[in-house]
Image: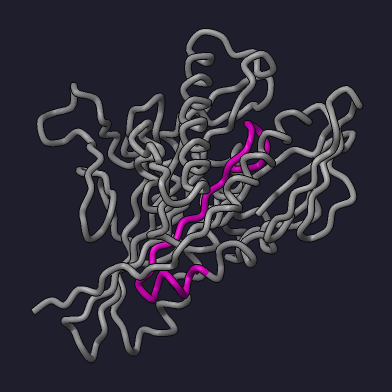
Amino acid sequence: MLRSLVGSEMCIRDRDEHVVNLQPPDSREGKGKSVRFERAFMGEHTQDVVYDTVARPLIKDVLSGCSATVMAYGQTGSGKTFSIFGPAEQLGRRRRQSLAKTDCGRIGRDAGIIPRAAEDLFDAIKAAEHGYECRVEVSLVQIYMEILQDMITGATSMMSELPGQALRIREDPQYGTFIENLSSHVATSASEVKDLVERGYARRCVEATHLNDVSSRSHVIVCMRVIVREKEDVGLVRHGRLQCVDLAGSESIKKSGSVGLRAEEAKSINLSLLCLGNVISCIAQGAGATPRFRDSKLTRLLQDSLSGCVKTVMIVTAPPGAEHYRETLSSLQFAERAITVSYTHLTLPTKRIV
């Protein structure tokens, strides 16, 4: 999926719901480029339209015991956090209205995918409660300069952590890649999910640059895990998972004006995104190519989402302004590689407890 928000002089033109035509502002930049997506959203498309297309169909899959991922990729300031969470400038302020709802209790117009998915998830659980018992667990982790941090407890992957408490990436042959010692918190309602997300987001590394006043300096993964137990067969348990990934934006250090630590952060972000692009390119080549998932913590954590074990939707955000032509071109080229990857929709193991 492509999402393009507001811009000045446009370099994205003559588009429809599936095709985006990119025209260089200067003929010396080369020829234009046309890319076909499953769906292209422009500035006039509201958050509910994006959610209904991208994420709402995944809720039923998750309750059926499947694992799904929604991932946002794009340059800094292009709308990734807005798409996943909502308005970035309001996040972390511990205001219930900021993430999802108006004072009247309705979903706010600018609410992102996470609060909308939480509402739909608990609505579906309530509708099916006569036949099932469901438990929802929430976890949040950020990757900052290759350091993992639990956004709820503050624990990290640093060697200085107390023995047995540091975060470690592990692999389970049955359930895939996971983070050892990452805390998981039970939520009994959509509002509790939103409170946990707000609480965790307050730890996100965010700084101002010339391109973005609230530039994310870390990748964030929010996971809503659903354990479904059938009342008629209490020993039968299904595990579903919805994972929302807000990637830090690719960044031109020259344009962002980053220096010192900000520049080091940008280099780390760009390197991890390069690893992600390399993995996707390798997967797109098909049999015989071996993706290097261990080149970064990001690609290792997304291994299940990228290797066919998870139903994955990627939102590529791209500013349509002519001043961002090269960055938008790079995002579209990334999207082209991602489109060629075919995913298999697999169900997580159903476990019988005797």
Query: What span is colored magenta in the figure?
Result: 58-80
Above or below 167: residue 351: below
Quarter of the image with the C terminus in it = bottom left
From the viewer's perspective, is 319 left or right of 72? Answer: right
Residue 261 x/y as whole percent: 48, 12
Q: Residue at x 19, y 33 (%)?
A: 166
Residue 113 x/y as whole percent: 56, 57
Q: Residue at x 66, y 42 (%)?
A: 79
Is residue 204 visible from the viewing direction of this image? yes
Q: Residue at x 44, y 40 (%)?
A: 220
Residue 292 sits in which quadrant?
A: top left
Q: Residue at x 41, y 46 (%)?
A: 288
Please count the marks in the image.
Answer: 0
From the viewer's perspective, is 153 left or right of 284? Answer: left
Residue 309 sits in which quadrant?
A: bottom left
Question: Is residue 47 shown in magenta?
Answer: no
Residue 331 x/y as whole percent: 66, 38
Q: Residue furthest top?
A: 260
Quarter of the image with the N terminus in it = bottom right
Is residue 11 visible from the viewing direction of this image? no
Question: Is residue 67 shown in magenta?
Answer: yes
Residue 41 x/y as whole percent: 74, 54
From the viewer's perspective, is 14 left or right of 209? Answer: right
